[in-house]
Each structure stands twice: as structure tokens, then as C-alpha cells.
Amino acid sequence: MTNDLKSLRGGAAITGVATFGCGETPGFTDIELLARAARAAVADAGLKMSDIDGLCTASASSTMWGLPVVEYLGLNPRYIDTTMLGGSSFIAHLLPAMQAVRSGQCNAVLVCYGSAQRSATFGRREIVAARRFLDPQPYEHPYEPMFPISAYALAASRHMHEFGTTREQLAQVAVAARAWARLNPEAFMRDPLSVGDVLASRMVSDPLTVRDCCLVTDGGGAYVLVSAERARHLPRKPVYVLGNATAVWNRQISSMPDLTVTAACQSGREAFAMAGLSPSDIDVVQLYDAFTINTLLFLEDLGFCPKGEGGRFVQDGAIAPGGKLAVNTNGGGLSCVHPGMYGIFALIEAVRQLRGEAGERQVRNARTALAHGNGGMLSSQATAVLGTEEVL
């Protein structure tokens, strides 16, 4: 970690967040969902759209997504980042945006996403075919795997084989997420869920059942980043970015050196180093839980428990409300929202917790939070450490 990166610690703050259309929102396109969330986040920050001179966005449906977003929102950004790393993109966008703000290239960066994946008129098969065309993986696609779930099922199977992780322990992740979702009026699925329900649900890709898998929803999310100095003069409680890092080790699941170890080891280590904190200092954890195995892998790789201990760590409601560690307090991608890419929603929930705006699910005295994004098939990893003014 260079001194230059460490000097960025706390130099920028998130001052506005918003979501829109989370769940099922027929009649809205991707960009309309994005725009509703973007305008709400800018208003939440106490700014006008004309104040926004930086933009970060990405989409799985367009290779030049930033251009129509600029046009649709009427922006004229001096800084723009459309780096596409999958679901981790919107957490990975943080560090370059912080550097752009510090350099004076821009003053207020809008990070935004929208997807009508659930209500889209085109079918899932067409989406899969398009992704294979745009993102060929020559060693895997010829076998026609059920991606992405088959990739995560491989990781789950290996974790079970190597460490004795059980199906019941994986199911505990889904049950905990649902318990948090039941406290969140924005969550898409709020019905009771038991370990038995998870195990008895339809098998999709062994050992993962449908309840081990994330939702398919619509939704838009956005946040606004400004300098720490400017944030102190805006109406909302600032949430400071203490650390951020991104790491990529592979694209294809077959290229992972170890199916049970992800690049979150690197992104987490570097983000904590920049923040000057450790996992034991974190009050709230928001992880990209596209599948139940994700939560176990990231708890291990980010240092919340030793490698191989993730299954035992989450037992007995340990990450559910009232447990030893508050994880995915909005219900996560498993029960709250997952419109194709989830990372921005993990960050938004972290901000809401640190601002004390999470209602029934509020974690008491939360001053630090970690938000972690995952892209592709355990491919890209991005970690952000956030804090309130008390921990600057």
C-alpha cells in the first residue's frame, strides 16, 4: 500500500444514496430505473443534477453504456468511468472517483446502475446466448454449463469436500438473509424461510437449490461521492471512504488456482491496509451473495474467520439478526434485490446503516462497515471500508 493511497483515506465521502424499483417494476427500462435512482440520490445529497460533473456506470447489456446515460441524464461530465467488471464494478469505481475528486478533475461523482432483468420482454435464453457471444470462454462454453450457477456449484462442492462444509451450513446463509429481509420493507422476498425449506427446494445445480441462488429482480441504485470538506456542508451525515481495493485473478472458473480461495484475499487486505483497520473493527458487513457459497468464501477471504471455517462460523444464526456479526442486513441478493449486478446495493445498505437510517434492521451504534462486490464467476473482487466521522 503506497503512502499516496493511504493519504486518500477519508478524503471523500458518500453524501447521497437511493434505490428505485427494487423487485418487480414492469414498464421500466434499464435506463429509466437508473435515472429514477440517480435523481433521487442526487436530491438525497442536497445537490442538483447540474452539480454532477463526474459519472461512473456500467451495464451487462451495452458496451458503451455511459454514453446514453450521459445523454439521458443531461450531464456534461469532466470525469467518466465505465469500467465493467461485473457486479463488483460499482465498488471498484470508488477509488478512481476519489482520485478524480482529489485532483480537482471533478467535484461530485454520480455512480449509478439500473436493470429491468425480471420484467424484460426478452427471455433468459436470449440473455445467455448474448453473453456467450460477447464474452466467449473457450474452455468452458463448449460444454454448455448452466452458468453462472454451475461455476458456484463447483466452488461449493470443493468447499464441502475439502473442509467438511455441510448443506445445512450453506442453508444457514439463506435463512439469515431472509431473517434480515423480513425487517426490510424494500426486500422482494419476506416470507419465513427455514433450513428445511432451503434443503427441500428445487435442485438447480448440485449441491445448490433454488433457495441457495440469488433473486432475479428489477432495480436501480445510485450514490454520490464528494470531497470530505464539501460533504460537511451538505445536509446528510457523511459516510467516509476509508479504504478501497480491487483484485482480479481469473475470468473463467476453470482458471482459478483454488476453487475455495478468491481474489477477495487481496482486495480485502489492501482495503483494510488503506483504512488502517482490521476485520475485528467492522460493525456491519455487506457481501455479494449471488449464491450461499459466496458468503462463506468472502467471510473467510476477507478475514472474518479462518479458511475452511465459514460453514461453522455462520451456524446457529451467527450472521442473522441478533447474531455475532451483522451480515447482509438488507436481505442481500438472496432475499432483497438482485437485478443482474448487486454490488451497488451492498454499498447503499452499508451507507444507510452508518447513517442510522435502516429502520427495524438498524445495527446499533454502527460506525464502520465493509461492502464487498463480486463480478463474473468469482472473477473480480472489490472491497470498500466505510466509516462515520467518529473513526476518521
Image (spheres, rainbow, N blue to C red):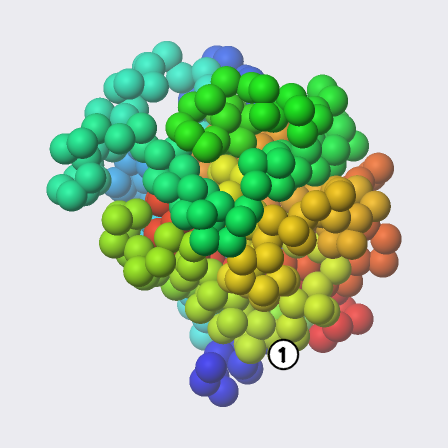
Between 290 and 30, the one lying in front of the other is 290
Between 90 and 318, the one lying in front of the other is 318
Vertical order, 51 against 291 (above or below)? below
- Which residue appears at 16% of the width and 43% of the height? 139
The answer to whether residue 11 is seen in the rendering is no
- Which residue appears at 78% of the width and 54% of the height? 324
> Residue 90's x, y, as percent?
47, 50
Between 147 and 245, the one lying in front of the other is 147
Between 241 and 193, the one lying in front of the other is 193
Vertical order, 250 against 176 (above or below)? below
Q: Which residue is mark 1?
A: 276
Q: Quarter holding the C terminus?
A: bottom right
- Which residue appears at 33% of the width and 15% of the height? 123
Query: From the viewer's perspective, is 73 left or right of 354?
Result: left
Residue furthest bottom in the image: 3
Q: Secondary structure at mark 1?
A: loop
The answer to whether residue 328 is seen in the rendering is yes
> Residue 270's x, y, as percent?
49, 73
Quadrant of the image occupied by residue 325? bottom right
Vertical order, 11 against 92 (above or below)? below
